[in-house]
Amino acid sequence: MKAGVIMRKDVAKSISKLQGEELGMINKSEMARRMGCSRRTVERYIKHEENPEDKKIPTARPSLMDGFKETANEKVDKYGASAMAVYKFIKKKGYMGKYCTVANYVKTHKANAQKKATIRFETSPGLQAQTDWKESVKMTNRQGEEFLVNIFLTVLGYSRLKYVKLTVDRTQKTLFSCIIGLLAFYGGVPHEILFDNMSTVVDRSKTTFKQVVINDTFKYFADDAGFEPITCRPYRAKTKGKVESLAKLVERLRVYNEEFDTFEELEAIMREFMEEVNNESSQATGEIPNERFKREKEYLRPLPCMHLLSSYISHYKEYKVSKESMINYKGCKYSVPTYYIGKSLHVIETDEEIKIYYDEDIISRFTISEKRLNYKTEHVREILASDALSHLNVYEIDSFIQNNLSTMDILLD
């Protein structure tokens, strides 16, 4: 066997064990099948075994990358340089080989780095949640109308409890809304949440391959919410394995094509799906996420002030309270206690109601209506007692409200 040829030790060892008659009794093709190599390889190794004087210590072939490997490793690991960039750089340093040699080396180096970085570990209770998007999922309703939706995914690391939400976009406000929803769903806050290096989380202008910088708005939101944002490290796609496993589960939703009419019905299907997967045994833990979560919940941090988080997704605007003790919001008037006459308030609107705040304190809330005038009974009582009906007692004022205001086209709560 010629020097420089790298031996397959498994083949050489197997043939060395077959001595004398035993070696001659086994067909070479059968040997090749058993050893996972070609018949020609078997013949070469048998010849090598029968002529020990020809044995030579195999030597590894020198590589044109020798002398440049350390430089290539540094440029790839620290700065995320591409194989072509490395090739161009080391060529100026004296590299004489071809680009394909560099490309193969960089590919192997990255694979080895990723393999070393993916040692599996179990997350401690309450420590981490992993989030991601399943982007641009096409769903078709019964009428053949196509819905292009995104699916926001979150998995708690210890219990594998999953939170899933449909979205129509992936803006930062939508991300905030999803996080607010998952915190409410979990009833607490994990110590850290893992994200991809998405533009809604990181500051791309300041981020380098070596250091990821969280953008200011997201950092403020995370601080108010009480979690630390964590981003994926280079070559560590598998660190998000838990949420990527959930992405596979979401494929099960495809059977619901042509099984719904509206977006709201699709959202209902998503909620049912979330309930199903949280009550199925996890392959990773062998337990049902809902049951395992009972042990994890106590390790979560307490919920923050949720209306403070809601301010990140609402349009912040101040509304001055009129002499009638009301604010004008989107063409409708809403009452507040008379104490706030002349003061500036702000409003947070959700899907079903508006909440009126003075600084950080909620002072009134109303179900959204199309009524021009919207009163709380206790506010009306204050307003009348302070002015028009100040000469009446509380019972007479209540009687006036009942007999007069209840018949008017107003919302009296």
Image (cartoon, rainbow, N blue to C red):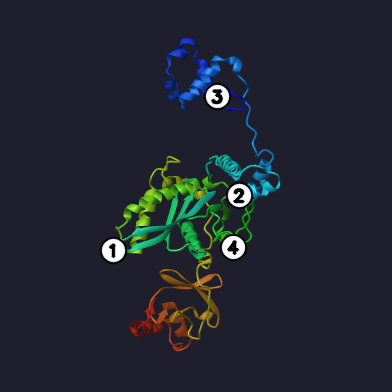
Residue type beneath disc 4: Tyr
Marks 3, 2: nearer the viewer? 2
Q: Is residue 277 above or below residue 333?
A: above
Rendered-image quadrant of the C terminus: bottom left
Q: Secondary structure at mark 4?
A: helix
Camera-side residue of 410 and 35: 35
Q: Residues within 10 Å of mark 4 (few under 14, many from 20)?
A: some
- 228 vs 20, left or right, is right
The residue beneath circle 1 is 143
The residue beneath circle 2 is 84
Q: CA distance from mark 3 to mark 4?
A: 58 Å
Residue type beneath disc 1: Gln
Q: Are marks 3 and 4 in contact (CB under 8 Å)?
A: no
Marks 3, 4: nearer the viewer? 3
Q: Earlier in the sequence, mark 3 or mark 2?
A: 3
The residue beneath circle 4 is 220
Q: CA distance from mark 1 to mark 4?
A: 44 Å
Marks 2, 4: nearer the viewer? 2
Residue 351 showing in the rendered view: yes
Q: Earlier in the sequence, mark 3 or mark 4?
A: 3
The quadrant in which residue 399 appears is bottom left
The residue beneath circle 3 is 9
Camera-side residue of 99 and 281: 99
Q: Earlier in the sequence, mark 3 or mark 1?
A: 3
Q: CA distance from mark 3 to mark 2?
A: 35 Å
Q: Mark on residue 256?
A: none
Residue type beneath disc 3: Lys
Q: Is residue 358 above or below residue 8?
A: below
Q: Earlier in the sequence, mark 2 or mark 4?
A: 2
Q: CA distance from mark 2 to mark 1?
A: 50 Å
Q: Position of residue 23 (x, y in %)?
A: 47, 14
